[in-house]
Amino acid sequence: MLLLVIAATMTSCTGERMLMRTGERILFLGDSITELGVKPNGYVALVQEQLSTQYPELGIEIIGAGISGNKVTDLLQRLGNDVIERKPTIVFIYIGINDVWHWALPNHKGTTKEEFEGVLREIVARIRYSGAEVVLCTPSVIGEKFDRTNPQDPMVEEYCAISRKIAFDRRIRLCDLRKAFIAYLTENNKENREKNILTTDGVHLNDAGNRLVADEMLRFLGER
């Protein structure tokens, strides 16, 4: 049984729990964080392990659909093949890091706030139209300094605000990973380090980061 990293009373994830059904197909859509999440001790693998233990009779299928370097526009381009055609019943969308981070990388380009919002709204609408439920996650961190002095913190917060607004407008569940990460780092990063608390490099998750993300997502998936 996974240990809760954040107390159950926190409101980092909002929306009623989903009751698991026979044949549930849960898909995780995202970038390299999700691509790595299917590996042992990755957050997708941890969710699968927990649900297989908790609901062995339901035959729940877990699908990882993460590709390194993806931004929100990339998700839209592969939405048909990688999501809709696989007929998931629940889709977690965990995107936004590269949309911000790439503005600071040589020979890369991020996503404008306007495009990020417009494309993310379309992705949510198309997934819901297919019949799947959506859980929208906020981007987590680009740098782990808890005092909000990471260079791209202000922009990350702006993109998180967009995701929160879409979840509110569309009345879908919100998994506020940003809020959960900041709460954890405030408590556990007293030295204000840039990395190696929840990530290996300020972005990609280490074991503790994967456990935190898995626990936050498991809040939605039936009673613990």
Image: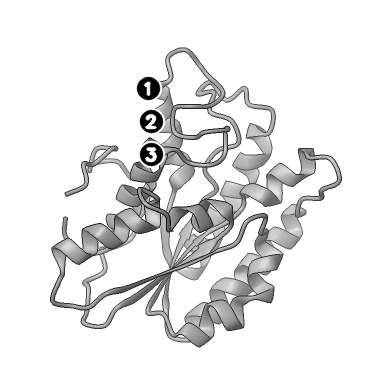
Q: Is residue 30 above or below residue 102?
A: below
Which numbered disc covers residue 188?
1
Which numbered disc covers residue 184?
2
Q: Quadrant of the C terminus?
A: bottom left
Spatial CA span between label 2 and label 1: 6 Å
Q: Secondary structure beneath disc 2?
A: helix
For the point 52% across and 43% down, the residue is: 140
Residue 132 in sight in this render:
yes
Q: Secondary structure beneath disc 3?
A: helix
Depth order, front residue of 62/84: 62
Whichever of callouts 1 and 3 sits on the residue coming sooner in the sequence is: 1
Spatial CA span between label 3 and label 2: 14 Å
Which numbered disc covers residue 134?
none
The amino acid sitting under disc 3 is: Asp
Q: Evaluate if marks 3 and 2 touch, with contact meaning CB atoms under 8 Å apart.
A: no
The residue that disc 3 covers is 207
Coordinates of residue 210 in the picture (x, y in percent): 39, 45
Coordinates of residue 178 in the picture (x, y in percent): 48, 42
The amino acid sitting under disc 1 is: Asn
Q: Residue furthest front?
A: 40
Q: Is residue 157 above or below residue 168?
A: above
Q: Evaluate if marks 2 and 1 touch, with contact meaning CB atoms under 8 Å apart.
A: yes
Whichever of callouts 3 and 2 sits on the residue coming sooner in the sequence is: 2
Q: Nearer the viewer, mark 1 or mark 3?
A: 3
The amino acid sitting under disc 2 is: Tyr
Q: Residue furthest top?
A: 191
Does residue 87 appear left or right of residue 102 in this picture? left
